[in-house]
Each structure stands twice: as structure tokens, then as C-alpha cells.
Amino acid sequence: MCNACLIESVKSSMLSRRQIFAGAAASGAAAVAMAAMGAQPALAQARGKVLDLTHVLDEKFPTFDGAPGIAYEEAVNFDKNGYQLWKLTIFEHSGTHIDAPLHFSRDGASVAELKPESLICPLCVIDITAKARDDANATLDAADIEAWIRANGDIPAGACVAMNSGWGAKVGTPEFRNTPDGNFAFPGFAKSATDLLAGMNVAAIASDTLSLDPGNSADFAVHHSWLPGGRYGIENLANIEQLPATGATIFVGAPKHARGTGGPARVMAVI
């Protein structure tokens, strides 16, 4: 074979290889692009509504002991530095917040030790607004749970069971925390209810009031029995009246500080 012919043969072979590689690369790029395009419509077609269940925490939000739950101190001034920064002093159990097992046990799990999978839960909402209209210290009891199950089906293991007492409408008024004569008064869970839920392996309970226990509780029976069992609670949920009885999923953005007995949380639901 002449040198010229050999050179042409090599060039032809190289061109063929380039075309093969280019075709493979193009096919790979097309596959990636198709995958990306396939993902976008899936996101765009999502119909779930996101509902914020979190009250804004400021110095005026009611707390159990009456002291402001948060304080601000300017750490960096914008006019002087071109950016701004606050130093915050926060009581763990302020605003919409989580109660970790450590809150009512000497060596229970801290808020940082809660399993991530326990913070995303099917949400079951039990309405006791009728009871709460007649009794400021009304409780969600075992009979309410049994009635809910008859109407809606079983409560799944790992669920969060939330009480809707209608108390969120009172935020910003003295009645959210007290009777006119200054006594604690707000709805909560009865121990009969939480004992029943514990047997169903429920992960969490949540209230739209200042506490898991009712305002007139003298012994915090629910706190003492529910939290040391390795479960957690959420207090001061917002917008709970906008949730369906079943079908929503709750996402609990719990804080993750060491030794935390709880802390303000950003809580949301997808309906």
C-alpha cells in the first residue's frame, strides 16, 4: 500500500472513531437532558399546598411563665459595617416549639438526638373546638381518638396527632393564656388519650395552645408520661384549623443544639 493510501486510511479510521465518540457523547447529553426535562414536569405538576404552622416569634408572643421568649441585641450595625446581625437570647420553649424527651427526663433524648425520620409524619388532626367553647381547660381524651378512628380510619404508626381547639384565634389576646382572674386556662391532651396513642406507636402530639397539658393541670401528667417514652411534642401550632382531619404530612424543622430540651421550630404541612 502506498504511503498516501495509508495516510488516507488512518485519517478515515480516526474520523470514524470521532463520529462514534461524538455520537455517544451526544446520546449521553441527550439522556441527561431528557432526565432533567422529565424531572421538571414532575415538580411542576405537584399539587400539594404548603401550609405554615408556625407563629412568628417576637417579644410579645405569649409564654408559659409570662417572660418574653426572645430578646434582641444589635451585634453588627448596617450603617457602620454594610451588613447587620442580631445577638439573640431565646428560651427554648417559646413560640411554636418542640418538646424533646429530655425536657421531662434526666437522660432522655435531646432535640439534637431526635431521629430525622420521626420529624416527617403523617398528620392526624382531632377537632375539639366544640368542647373548648364551653370549657377553657377542655381536654382531648381517649373517646375523641376513638371517634376520630371510626370516622377516618386507623392512626398510622409514626404519625403526629394534633389537637385543634380553636385556641389559635386567641393569640394576641390575654385569653390565650389566662382567665380574666389570671388563672391558666387553655385546652390540652388528657393522659387517657396519650396513653392510647403511645400504644399505637405515634411519634408526636401537637397542640395549638401553650402546653400539651391543659392550663389547669396540677401535675403535667401528659408531659411526664409522653416525653420520657422517647416521643416528642409540639406546642403553639398555627393555622391548624386549615388542615384536613387526615391526608396531610407534617415537616418539623426542629433545632439541633446539643443538650437541647426543645426549641423554636419551623413547622409546615403539605396538604
Image (spheres, rainbow, N blue to C red):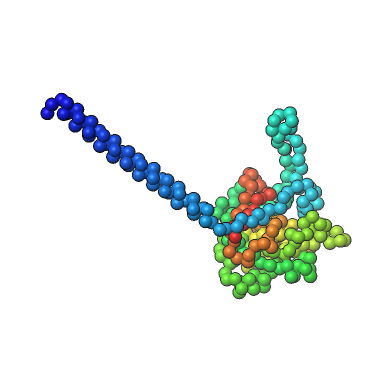
Point out the image quarter for the N terminus. top left
Residue 42: percent from left, percent from top: 49, 54
Q: Determine the residue positioned at 76% across, 37% down.
A: 73
Residue 170: percent from left, percent from top: 78, 59
Quadrant position of residue 71: top right
Q: Nearer the viewer, residue 130 or 1?
A: 1
- In the image, is residue 68 above or below residue 82? below
Q: Is residue 191 left or right of residue 41?
A: right
Residue farthest left in this picture: 1
Q: Is residue 184 left or right of residue 99?
A: right
Residue 57: percent from left, percent from top: 73, 49
Residue 50: percent from left, percent from top: 61, 55
Q: Determine the residue positioned at 62% across, 59% down.
A: 204
- In the image, is residue 186 above or below residue 117? below
Residue 55 appears anywhere in the view: yes
Q: Nearer the viewer, residue 184 or 18?
A: 18
Q: Determine the residue positioned at 25% across, 37% down.
A: 16
Q: Nearer the viewer, residue 260 or 119?
A: 119
| Total numbered labels | 0
- In the image, is residue 3 above or below residue 66? above
Quadrant position of residue 212: bottom right
Residue farthest right in this picture: 181
Residue 231 appears anywhere in the view: no
Point out the image quarter for the C terminus. bottom right
Residue farthest top in this picture: 3
Q: Determine the residue positioned at 80% across, 62% down.
A: 185
Q: Nearer the viewer, residue 145 or 172?
A: 172
